[in-house]
Image (tube, rainbow, N blue to C red):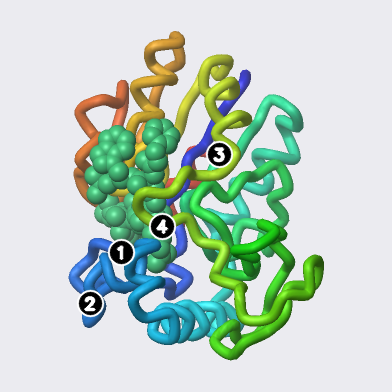
Amino acid sequence: MRIVVLTGAGISAESGVPTFRGSDGLWEGHAIEDVATPAGFRRNPALVQRFYDERRAFLAHVHPNPAHFALARLEAALGEDFLLVTQNVDDLHERAGSQRLVHMHGELKRALCTICRAAPEWDGPLGVPHSCPRCHIPGRLRPDIVWFGEMPYDMELILPALARCQLFVSIGTSGAVYPAAGFVATAAGAGARTLELNLDDSAGSPAFNESRRGPAGVLVPAWVE
Ligand code: BJW
């Protein structure tokens, strides 16, 4: 069976990573347009760098949970018939063992050179002027995060996989952000069955063949086994 899984912030919630649109949402205290848009970065790069520096440093204090591990086991069983598409910018899927995954909204642990577009791995702060390891131009690195208005990564892999999959599973995402919110319609239009695993009803719930409610750390291992 060919399966595409889409994950969102809800799968990392039980690891202690705040979700975006929850009551303790990560953007509280910061207007979205200040920290998650190219215009916000142009206006106040120091604020935006600091915001992502803090989140990158926070990754050292969190660990994958049973939902991340269950998806890694599913990948090991299905091999090339499996693709994990995550909207998350944390590295918890990799740390659980997932390899066939794409980070469509970027990664906290990469920088992006605004001059030569290199995306080197990055583990320290970006908030002071470092040089790009490829073009060596200093002070032009930004977080490798897809902000509003920017093109998500790996769409050329994701769209064909959606068109070919037999099952599309969405885990822990509110369905508020496009194009990911439209993947269920794309997969269903290509004939796939669609399943949602989420704590609450989401904007996308009506579009799924089946929705299960509960914490990802319980629902995902139960679905995989
Ligand atoms: C649990 C749980 C537990 C909690 N267990 N569950 C119409 C069509 C196309 C585009 C647009 C459109 N209208 C507007 C747009 C533009 C825009 C957009 O979508 N805006 C919306 C506000 C409407 N989109 C874009 O700009 C995107 N680019 C783009 O569209 O380019 C053009 C294009 C067009 C067509 C095809 C291809 C390209 C770029 C979007 C970039 C999003 N980036 C962000 C922020 C990064 C910065 C940062 O990290 O600080 O990525 S937005 C933010 O939301 C982040 C997330 O990845 C994303 C999704 O959030 P997610 O993961 O769903 O989290 P939450 O918090 O919303 O939900 C968590 C869920 O988990 C909840 O449902 C909980 O119940 C649940 N939950 N605990 C299970 N324990």
Judging depth in this view, the residue of 3 and 85 nearest the camera is 85
Instruction: Look at label 4 and name its amino acid.
Output: Trp
Q: Say whether disc 3 or disc 2 marks the residue closer to the N-terminus.
A: 2
Q: Distance between the residues labelled 1 and 2?
A: 9 Å
For the residues carrying marks 4 and 1, which lies nearer the camera in this image? 4
Closest to the camera, between mark 4 and mark 2, is: 4
C-alpha distance separating marks 3 and 2: 34 Å
Q: Is mark 4 within 8 Å of ligand 1?
A: yes
Image position, residue 181 (x, y; %): 33, 37
Asked whether 98 or 56 is in front, the reply is: 56
Q: Does the residue labelled 1 lie within 8 Å of ligand 1?
A: yes
Q: Position of residue 19 (x, y in %)?
A: 34, 65
**In the drawing, does residue 136 fall left or right of residue 2?**
right
In this figure, which residue is indicated by the disc labeled 1?
Answer: 20
| Mark earlier in primary sequence (4, 2) | 2
Label 3 CB-ligand 1 distance < 8 A: no
Q: Residue at x 47, y 43 (%)?
A: 151
On screen, 70 above or below 120?
above
Between 77 and 85, the residue placed more toward the observer is 85
Pointer 2: what residue?
A: 28
Which mark is in front, 3 or 2?
Answer: 2
Determine whether the residue tagged by mark 2 lies in a helix, strand or loop.
Answer: loop
The amino acid pointed to by label 1 is Phe
Q: Element under label 3?
A: helix
Separation (CA) of disc 4 from disc 3: 32 Å
Which quadrant of the structure image shows residue 44? bottom left
Per the model, the C-alpha gap separating discs 4 and 1 is 14 Å
Around disc 4, counting alpha carbons within 10 Å, would you say few (fewer than 14), some (14 to 19), or many (20 or more)? Answer: many
* Disc nearest the viewer among 1 and 3: 1
